[in-house]
Image (cartoon, coloured by chain):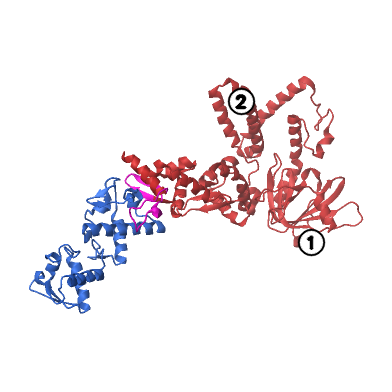
Amino acid sequence: MQKLGDFKLPQFFNYTPYFTLQPVRDTREKQLQLWKELILDYCKTQKIYTIGLEENFPLFSNPVIERSLNNEARETFLSALVSEGRAEWLDKGHKKCLILWHRIQDWAEIILQFVKDYGLEDGVMTIEDIRLGIESRGTELHGVDRTILNRALKILESKGKAAIFKGTSTDDEGVKFSV
Amino acid sequence: MAGNTEDQTFFPTAAVTGSGRPVLLPNEVECQLLSAVDLEFEERSPPGIADLSPALKSGLLILTTHRLLWLPANSLNSSATAIPLSSVVHIFSPKKSIKSMFHSPRIRIQVSMHSRSMVVTLVVRGKGDLDGFLGKLFESWRGKAWEADTCVTGSVSGSSMGSGSSSGRGGIYSSDGTVKMAGLTGILRKEQENWESTDKSLQDAFRDLNALMSKAKEMVMLADKMRQKLLSSSNAQSSEGNDDETGSREEIQDMLLSVGIISPVTKESAGALYHQQLARQLADFVRIPLERAGGMISLIDIYCLFNRARGTELISPEDLQRACSLWEKFDVPVMLRKFDSGVMVIQSKAHSDEEVFARIRTLVTRPDALRTGISASDAAIALGIAPAMAKEHLLSAEIKGLLCRDISPDGFRFYANIFSEFDANSLYLVKDHSIYSAWVQAVSLRAI
């Protein structure tokens, strides 16, 4: 079985038509579905949060069969993820895409769970601590993308479960939980 | 009503092809067509009552070298009425009178058959070149083409055509008064005459184009004769196995075979009915090439084949297309089909895409095709059709979901569509006995 790093690739990754955007609707629907699942799967196991369209994203080319997705196909597949709320464009030119293998509200839930597990219900943490601190090590929150974390915290704030306060720099932005 | 049925049995009926064209006798050539013609019958003997029996209304009248054919307007599945010119006794000159100016023009002819005489009136309600028609009618009538037939068939096969006119010309004197040949000298003389007349037809034919046109029928007959000769001699000599000679002979045979349509529909003969009649003739013609091509043939191929068969009086591409698009209005077994790409083909109505798709399916699920896919030219070779047509078939199979495409610097290839066998919820699942598993196997062979 072919592998990409430690990621096991499905058999159909060597099916050449998989790398050509199919024009027939039903076939394309199926192709889109398969690409969406594969991209989410891959990003989740490899902890990849953003995909640059013009960068060499390893999944988008297959040297074994000498095929790679063209730009139209890349944008089509990522747009399909965006329309399902599983990704977001980070710029207007659609060059960079934020991949949400957990939706933002799911990330918010994960933060809440983390807060409960570590007894931080009334505590204060810097945002950087959540991402890179000792407490989050071994959880899904470790190394999470800054944008995703901010968006999830905003959701919690709107629900009254957290208050974000600004520090002198982005590094000391803090959050007070009140679960 | 009794008079009507009698009239129709009085005249022989003529067979009509599936697309509503009359079936012509051997060597019979169409001369002119008139639309919206009524036939009225008026019995002369017994002279008691001039019974104007119910007429045949508003049909298509076709003048050939042998007969006058009348086809009902909706001529499909019904037969035509035929008046053999050989039994026409008299053609009345049209009377010029004040009264005739208000009438539809009519032509009256006296026909004698089965020792009965009858006057038939052709009432021309439609527009048409009536004087021209009358001229052609006289020409054909006096041409006595049917007599030439009985001579030819008489000398070739020794049997008469069964036409009554030949029975009166027996004996040792022929119709022009010369002594008929008998015995060995006679056969030799006959052979000599045949050669001379063949030579003369060749010379006449090439004198000018008009002469060529009038000789067209004879040229076709000559070609047919030569073909027969070649056929019999090749059978006799096949044991000798002279490859080169048989090769060239086959070539000539092919050439001669493609000299085909004895009576082409022309603008001159059909006038306003041109496209309609052309459509019917075309429908008859495409049957055999269609069968050979597997039920579908491109318009360009038919254009070449059809014009080649016509030999003279070539048709333009526009005429062909118009004729084909008229098929919708007739109940013919073929249709014009336009693919999304704009490619136009003729296909028989019995032809089904399913059959082609089934063949494509077996083609793309072979192990090597599973691995490398197929190109339009691969499909063309396997299906025995032109690449452009093969591509159309592949594209429609793709739309059907049977195939999918792979575009790469190596080219445009089609693969068996196995997307439906991939499971988005379980990306690594390969079901046993699926095309997917066959594909995995085929691909793994490459890796070794």
Residue type pointed to by label 1: Lys
Q: Which quadrant does the N terminus of chain B fall into?
A: bottom right
Which residue is disc 1 drawn over? B99
Give the labeled residue for mark 2. Answer: B234
Point out residue B397 in the picture as x, y percentages from the top left corner: 46, 51
The location of residue B170, given as percent across then percent down, is: 83, 31
Q: The red chain is which one?
A: B
Seen at 34% across and 52% down, the residue is: A18
Chain A's colour is: blue
Q: Which of marks 2 and 1 is in front?
A: 2
Q: Give the range drawn in magenta.
A: B405-433
**Front in this rendered view, residue A19 or B268:** A19
Q: To which quarter of the image does residue B254 belong?
A: top right
Seen from the viewer's position, the closer of residues B397 and B430 is B430
Dot 2 and dot 1 residues touching (CB under 8 Å): no
- Nearer-N-terminus badge (2/1): 1
Q: How crowded is mark 1: few (under 14 residues within 10 Å), some or many (20 or more)?
A: few
* Subunit ID for the residue under disc 1: B
| Secondary structure type for disc 2 | helix
